[in-house]
Image (cartoon, rainbow, N blue to C red):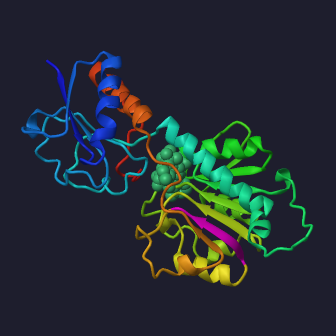
Amino acid sequence: MPVNVFFAAGPEHWPDYRIPLQNALAATGVDAVLADRAEDPAAVDYIVYSPGGIIADFTPFTRCKAVLNLWAGVEKIVGNATLTQPLCRMVDPAMTESMVEWVVGHALRHHLGMDRDIRSPAPHWDQISPPIARERPVAMLGMGALGQACAQALAALNFPVTGWSRTAKEVPGIPCLHGEAGLEAVLRQAQIVVTLLPRTAETENLLDARRLGWLPRGAFIINPGRGPLIDDDALLAALDAGQIAHATLDVFRVEPLPPDHSFWAHSGVTVTPHVAASTKPVTAAGVVAENIRRAEAGEPLLYLVDRARGY
Ligand code: NDP
């Protein structure tokens, strides 16, 4: 009997995903029927999901073996009490590439002081040479799929990168710390901080006034993780005081960022509209199909979310 795969990620995504998913499922050899509606929820074997998708109540999906999220972040679904099925998040190689490019680009902008030349009215001839990368320590908060890839790309350019995560980690070429003492140590020496943590109860306001104060004066912040990782008011105060030189923010507590939010007008803030890294249908379809193949073969699922941990 074929397995029924229900694409519940929303009608706007269906045209982009239908053919990649059909191709990827066919390539795995799994006999699957893919549909964007489920007449009989009890007959669905797998749900392809994204926040803003069309399911709020997972209770009727009694046969469902896994919910496969198209996004890396799961904060909008992980707390859903009706979701009892295994939940997998997305680790998409093309999305990782995008994130690496976005993070490295914004890090180099700040490192090289590009704004001076782009924004200064002509004529200007201030010969301020930036340090070389090996003199610019970077803190990578979050050393998961995306944090590790970004850390390694920055380290390849000779930035001294230190990683920080919840649990102890060994990553080739990147010293890694964890815990509160580790956070203080990593922040105290960082001139650029990149936040690639998930949104959980523990990471909410991780960068508050006290911890922003640990950074060397004039540090740069790059946040493609989630808005609530940083206390907005504390960040604005630190920017006004010169403690933080600039913050490049891709994610916000409320998205789209409301037009009257102070971030828009602040000269020390660059707002990008949650574009650091989107899931790419062809590669993501391969990940979804591989997880369905694994589940059918009785193999462990990839990128399984730990509900208690929240990511
Ligand atoms: P992973 O789950 O692979 O990695 C998460 C990392 O965060 C892990 O290193 C984990 O530690 C660490 N972490 C979690 N909680 C804590 C904590 N309380 N204290 C310290 N470290 C913690 O996620 P990804 O790398 O795939 O993605 C990271 C986030 O990036 C996503 O959750 C999402 O919010 C964001 N994102 C943003 C995008 C954008 O376009 N702006 C696109 C895609 C993702 P440990 O290793 O010990 O478990």
- Horizontally, residue 83 falls left or right of residue 117, namely left
Query: Looking at the rendering, which quadrant does residue 237 occupy?
Result: bottom right
Query: Looking at the rendering, which quadrant does residue 217 occupy?
Result: bottom right
Residues drawn in magenta: 243-250
- Residue at position x 27%, y 18% in the image: 30
- Horizontally, residue 230 falls left or right of residue 24, namely right
Query: Looking at the rendering, which quadrant does residue 66 occupy?
Result: top left
Q: Is residue 170 above or below residue 182?
A: above
Q: Does residue 147 appear anywhere in the picture?
A: no
Q: Residue furthest top?
A: 29
Residue 73: x and y in percent read: 42, 51
- Residue at position x 77%, y 70% in the image: 216
Tell me if residue 246 is in the magenta stretch. yes
Q: Residue furthest left?
A: 40
Viewer-side residue, 116 vs 254: 116
- Residue at position x 27%, y 22% in the image: 296
Q: Residue furthest front?
A: 123
Quarter of the image that includes the N terminus: top left
Residue 202: x and y in percent read: 47, 63
How many numbered callouts? 0
Viewer-side residue, 277 vs 289: 277
Q: Main secondary structure of the magenta part?
A: strand
- Horizontally, residue 127 falls left or right of residue 224, namely right
Residue 268: x and y in percent read: 66, 75
Tell me if residue 143 is in the magenta stretch. no
Q: Is residue 122 above or below residue 167?
A: below
Q: Does residue 206 appear anywhere in the picture?
A: yes
Viewer-side residue, 160 vs 97: 97
Residue 41: x and y in percent read: 10, 40
- Residue at position x 50%, y 55% in the image: 275
